[in-house]
Amino acid sequence: MTLDSVFVADHLQSTTTCYIQTLPFELLSHVFIICEQNYNAALTTPPDLRHNSCAFVLRSVCKQWNEVALCTPQLWTRIRILGPRTLALAEMWIQRSGAQELDISIILSSPTEIAASNALIEPHLSRIVTMHFGMTCGTTIYTPAQPAPLIPDTIRSLRFANIGFSNCTALRRNLSLFQRLKYLDLSSSSTDEKWMSVDEIRISRPDWFLMEELEEILLPMNALCERVRQYLLAPRLRYSSIRGHYFAPSPANTLIVREDLSSEQGPLGVHIVLLQVPEVESLTLIWSNRTADFLKPTFCDYALHCLGMKRHAFPLPDMSLSEDEWTDPPQMMLPRLRNLRMCNVPRIGTVDALYDRYVPTYTGSLPAVLERVEIDGPVEPTTWPAVAKTLREHGTTVIESFGTSIFRLQGNEPLNV
């Protein structure tokens, strides 16, 4: 073979081999990890389908990529268990994850499947940092007499999905064991108990429980919302939100309310619920289209009315409060509210309720001044000009549009057009 022929052969090989095939193992593995993170961030399929994820896609490209993927434990840390048929696959993923921290999602169709799932994850409890436990067949009752034994203190994020509790005592007992929890999602959970009476709140102090590292909580639109917040001591809690019923999915410290005229309208404890999320800074109210003769107040009307209410209620648990200070003085709803958006407001909308928000309490205190108010609707509400004048006098930026909407709905989220 001549020197020229050797040169030609080397040139052909270099031009036919993809550059990515020449990457060292460590670099290609790091690229795969980035792909997995981006893939899961954009994933919209249900959790039970996520075993068919980025790791399998990467493995199917070529032999080299298959070997690199199998030797990259970070690709196999999101474990999904959907009943007995997925246990073998979940076990394979756990083995491939090596010593990495685990994100465990257990979605079952029957309480009888819990034992098998627990047996699979029990040897790996110390590695679990995210836990999602739920049921696919609606709500089930899960109220153990004693705290569940499978509760690793390593968990930072916990979500219950479609889980019902006959009472809040068992839930509080179990939550008190998650001392390192930072994120808690109870938005699709419920309880058989009613809203708390004044007497129940008054005697609740001895049962307060501490979650010192909790930073964010998602609450349901039912009595469980009140019962959790009235017992929970969370000094680092900064973010809260409500989901379910009229409350659409929303970012932290944001509430989006979409009413539905086809369902029964009424206060439905909205004033109680709003007292449980004082961290909220942004509120969007979306009225449904109503006929001209529809005079019955709707859920959005009640929610807007609550913004000006000063309701006698016990403050949320706080160890800094003495027994004497823990009384039921008038409290303003959503005291940290900065941004208010009102979409499709009817002509008879109760916007004048905002007046009451600027009336001092008996202590002379005022809530945070609204920084921005946006409103649109088919026609201008009768009392809006006077309300808008008051808002502007307090330094609030007011954006209004009547006759043509300044909002376009994308899913549950209102967007400016």
Image (cartoon, rainbow, N blue to C red):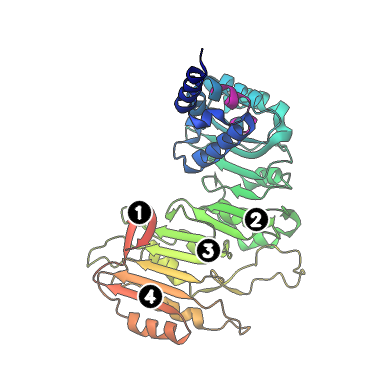
Cα–Cα gap, marks 1 and 3: 25 Å
Q: Relative to 254, does residue 411 appear above or below in the rendering?
A: above
Please tell me whether mark 2 sits on a helix, a strand or a loop.
loop
Write down the region rendered in magenta: 66-75
Residue 148: x and y, percent?
A: 70, 35
Amino acid type assigned to the residue bearing label 4 in the image = Val
Cα–Cα gap, marks 4 and 1: 25 Å
Residue 336 lies in quadrant: bottom right
Amino acid type assigned to the residue bearing label 1 in the image = Gln
Q: Which residue is tagged 3?
A: 274
Q: Relative to 395, does residue 342 appear above or below in the rendering?
A: above
Q: Earlier in the sequence, mark 3 or mark 4?
A: 3
Q: Residue at x 48, y 60 (%)?
A: 255
Cα–Cα gap, marks 3 and 4: 18 Å
Amino acid type assigned to the residue bearing label 3 in the image = Leu
Q: Which residue is tagged 2?
A: 215
Per the rendering, the mark at residue 410 is 1
Q: Nearer the viewer, residue 19 or 258?
A: 19
Q: Earlier in the sequence, mark 2 or mark 4?
A: 2
Q: Nearer the viewer, residue 184 or 272?
A: 184
Cα–Cα gap, marks 2 and 4: 33 Å
Please tell me whether mark 1 sits on a helix, a strand or a loop.
strand
Per the rendering, the mark at residue 351 is 4
Magenta stretch: dominant secondary structure: helix
